[in-house]
Amino acid sequence: MKKNLICFILLLSALNLMADTNVTNTYVQNPDFEARFAGWINDGFYFVTNSSFGQKQGKIYMERWVGSGGKIPNVEICQDLYLPAGTYTLMAGCHNIQQSGSIPECTGAMLYANDESVTVTESKDYSLTFTVLQGVTRIGFKVTSTNANWAAIDNVKLTQLDTNLEAEYAELQKLITKAEEVLGEGEGATELAAAINDAKGLIEGGTNEEIGSIAKSLSDATLNYRILNATGATPKITSLNKFVAAGATILLARMTAQPTTASAVLEKGFCWSTNPEPTIFDNRSTRYFSSNGEIYCMEKLQPGTMYYVRPYIMTKGYKLAYGDIIKVPTLPKGSVTADYDNNGNTEENNRIASAVEEIKWLYNNLSYVRGVNVSVHYSSGTPTADCSYGGWMRVGSNESYQQTGTILHETNHGVGVGTSDVWWNGNYRAEGDRGKWLGPRATQMIQFLNKNNSVYMTGDNTHMWPTSAVSGFNYGINGSWEDSYNPENTLLYYGNVLITHALHQDGLVCSSSVGFASPAYTFAQDDETKYYIKTTDVDCGNETALLGVKESGALTMQPMNTEMAQADDNFAWNILYEPKTAYYYLRNVGTGRLMSYSSQQFRTTPRTSPSTNERVQLLPSRSTYKKSTLKTSSYWLTINKNALTAKNETTVGSASFDANDGNTKQHWLILTEKEMEVFDQFWTGIDEIQSTIDNDDDTWYSLDGRRVEKKQLKRGIYIKNGKKILF
């Protein structure tokens, strides 16, 4: 009997252990701070490498310290988590102490998760239990109005507990009580009352699997009721930057709204969804950085996913206004790896290793850089730091250069800044191997970051930096003095990686293994729109010809005005985008065939889903195409580094990508039907089209009356026998 009882107790213990699950690495980014500030929102904490804090584990912990007897300012470090409904325990090693010994138990510090918190004083592990039903959970460590001189935190852990219906129902009851307090006679009352009844019904006899969706429905119905019955003046979005800085899991966006006074505004930010009509009931964020206005930050998105984002503002009277919707994909996640040889002393190794971990996180969450391993080595004889193309890096003994900003700067060299042939070859720089960077993607990025359309990236034959007109960060981080590194310099670091990757999208080559520009969402397309493709080269039919498909599947160009194109879908294209690879594919509307490259030629294939031979990279040219009222970008259309090339007025072929921006035979316009109408002026009054010259042809004249010899005829409009002829 005793033996059976012991077995039963052991079995119960085993089941309990199985029921509580450590989910730290599933939901918390950088929980041990070994990658410094990566993934955390920091307001005033510093990273520290020493071992003074008794709860330290690993290389790094976070602290705020002033001299003994002093008082630290208000500080906070936190992270937003997307947790499924359930009950959790948050644990961390913390303290909030006065080293002078005059105060045995200091005030003002807490470890928290949403509205639950535990007071932090002496140095030990603290924990709290909280219940999540829906929405974003913010966890963190906060110190306010303290009498302590030293606060510290490390080793954050998150455990999901076995189902705790009592706690979950208690949280749901709070939502019910709040909803009942709001409910009145206004619009949306029926929907809110139904949501309340559903929640009560769950408590009386539902299943806990439903509690997350029931809680969200109730919370949404409560907020929607308030919005439908809002009071006060209506706010508005006053401006919106249509350029969104896109990383793999992070989007940055700009807007302005009215009112601007904090006393009148309940929330202001961006909402997003994979649904084309996002609302605040999907996902939303109010977090922003200050840089000549506000840059709003949307985080923890899925890589390689098409999102729709829009700004919103809601007053304290619950008046809500939205701005325009922007379609923007996240990048596929970067695959940068990094290692450090740990050949310095303990403090040096801790600083360098943690900086290396942070830049790895930054690159893989903000870029699609591939094929690079940053191999970092300690070198006491190196005055600062250096790095070769490919990522072999040395860091010296100077502490100022053992920081994230320096490692980012050197990684720039590792991925091609000042080291790749593209940096020097004269195609992308205003002065050959130096001066203004001419690529549009990097220009858009720096102008977005600074909210200034007159700035651009420049540099010498080794380094990059924004123009001197820029106020704020020098995103090239060309010296230790340009990186405060404590507290967290998030926007500086984000901007450095975003700009560097924008250089790759323009044409800089991040690694020899990739060997080409990084693919990106460079053309804002609509899946259902019919587009028309036209060369920019005048001698090859810019004014009259369109790219189409013969019945054989071969590509061709033929004279085609808007009316003719509308009647022949073999000259219309759908431009589709594949977020998981960042490539486009082009489907001919008439034949359903995809543009493809094989056997050293461009043609089309009946394949319905793209292989690597159908993945098209649209690389923007570095000049603006202008014709009459049309002002637009042109693009290189490349597949596997081969560029679609106009040969003459009727024939296209393939050639190696030529980065010379003057090579108009490789530049293509992608036009809507409306944009096509600009070219219809060249058809006005044309009597007939002639594509060959017979021996008995009469004399040809130019439109200004000059006689033209037959051997001098080029594609264009002429007069023959008193008629306008398109040749």
Image: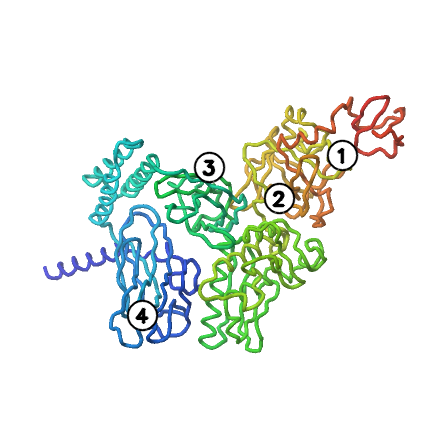
Q: Residue 276 carries which label?
A: 3
SS class, disc 4 = loop
- Mark 4 highlights which residue? 148
In this view, the mark in front (3 or 4): 4
Mark 3 or mark 4: which comes first in sequence? 4
Mark 2 or mark 4: which comes first in sequence? 4
SS class, disc 2 = strand
Q: Which residue is drawn at 70% across and 28% down?
A: 680
- Residue 357 vs 701, above or below: the answer is below
- Residue 481 vs 707, above or below: the answer is below
Q: Residue at x 44, y 45 (%)?
A: 270
In this view, the mark in front (4 or 1): 4
Q: How far apart are marks 3 and 4 (CA)?
A: 50 Å
SS class, disc 1 = loop
Q: Position of residue 245 (x, y in %)?
A: 52, 49
Q: Which corner quadrant of the image does residue 727 belong to?
A: top right
| Pointer 2 with pointer 4, Cβ within 8 A | no
Q: Which corner quadrant of the image does residue 41 belong to?
A: bottom left
Q: Residue 290 carries which label?
A: none
Q: Which amino acid does label 3 sit on?
A: Pro
| Pointer 3 with pointer 4, Cβ within 8 A | no
Mark 3 or mark 2: which comes first in sequence? 3
Q: How far apart are marks 3 and 1 (CA)?
A: 40 Å
Q: Left or right: where does residue 331 sit relative to residue 19?
A: right
Mark 4 or mark 1: which comes first in sequence? 4
Q: Where is residue 667 in the image (x, y as percent from the top left)?
A: 69, 42
CA neighbours of label 4 inside 10 A, class few (<14), some (14 to 19), many (20+): many
Residues 111 and 142: in front is 142
Q: Left or right: where does residue 630 sit relative to residue 16?
A: right
Q: Which amino acid does label 2 sit on?
A: Leu
Indicate the quadrant containing the N terminus: top left, top right, bottom left or bottom right.
bottom left
- Residue 445 vs 308, above or below: the answer is below
